Image: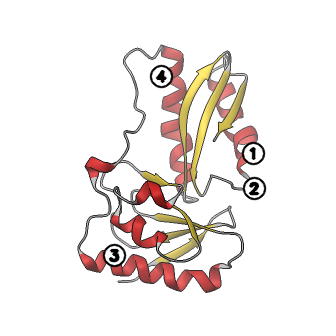
């Protein structure tokens, strides 16, 4: 098994591409080890590597975030080993029943919110997935769109620029009712 790696704009995160599907449907974000304990044998195995601070599972990639005190040169071999060991074990990547529910489109969403969600899902999320991250719609209130940053986007030094110069401009162009975009924890 050959696992490719790619740096991300976030120096604390690296993208690992195992050359096979990771998540069949959806994504899974584990910002801390306790969130992975029951839900993901793969994330649990990665958190067992000293220095791993977060795990994000995408369709065909795994983004691993590290603690600041370690460098990737020393951490990467252990992470690669954990990923390889997991896929060779035959265990599932996630236990579907233990995953938290993802926010989805709701029938009661008004047309404006549906338009914002659609733009985020079709234009923003695919672009940030290329960098090992994800941005999820959290709400819209009085002209402000609230987004949740995950994977490599969480804590990324360039995420403010991405939000303001990229996403905010895009949403304001297509949805004039949007005045601002803010990240939430």
Q: Are marks 3 and 4 in contact (CB under 8 Å)?
A: no
Residue where numbered disc 3 is placed: 86
CA gap, disc 1 and disc 3: 34 Å
Q: Position of residue 142 (x, y in %)?
A: 67, 15
Q: Are marks 3 and 2 in contact (CB under 8 Å)?
A: no
Marked residue nearer the N-terminal end (1 or 4): 4
**Tag nearer the camera, 1 or 3:** 3
**Tag nearer the camera, 2 or 4:** 2
Where residue 160 is drawn, which disc sits there? 1
Query: Which residue occupies 68% across, 79% down?
Result: 71
Query: Which residue occupies 52% across, 58% down?
Result: 32
Where residue 114 is drawn, which disc sits there? 4
CA gap, disc 1 and disc 2: 7 Å
Query: Which residue occupies 72% across, 27% down?
Result: 180
Query: Viewer-proximal residue, 55 or 4?
Result: 55
CA gap, disc 1 and disc 4: 24 Å
């Amino acid at each position: 098994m050959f696992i490719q790696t790619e740096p991300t704009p976030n120096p604390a995160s690296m993208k690992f591409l195992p050359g096979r599907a990771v998540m069949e449907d959806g994504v899974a974000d584990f910002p801390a080890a306790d969130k992975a304990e029951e839900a993901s044998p793969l994330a649990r195995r990665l958190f067992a590597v000293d220095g791993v601070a977060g795990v994000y599972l995408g369709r065909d990639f795994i983004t691993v975030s590290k603690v600041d005190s370690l460098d990737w040169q020393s951490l990467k071999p252990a992470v690669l080993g954990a990923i390889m060991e997991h896929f060779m074990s035959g265990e599932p990547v996630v236990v579907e029943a233990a995953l938290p529910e993802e926010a989805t489109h709701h029938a009661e969403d008004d047309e404006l919110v549906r338009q914002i969600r659609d733009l985020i899902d079709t234009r923003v999320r695919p672009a940030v997935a290329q960098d090992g991250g994800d941005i999820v719609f959290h709400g819209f209130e009085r002209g402000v769109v609230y987004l949740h940053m995950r994977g490599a986007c969480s804590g990324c030094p360039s995420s403010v620029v991405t939000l303001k110069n990229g996403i905010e401009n895009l949403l304001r162009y297509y949805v004039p009712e949007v005045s601002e975009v803010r990240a939430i924890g």
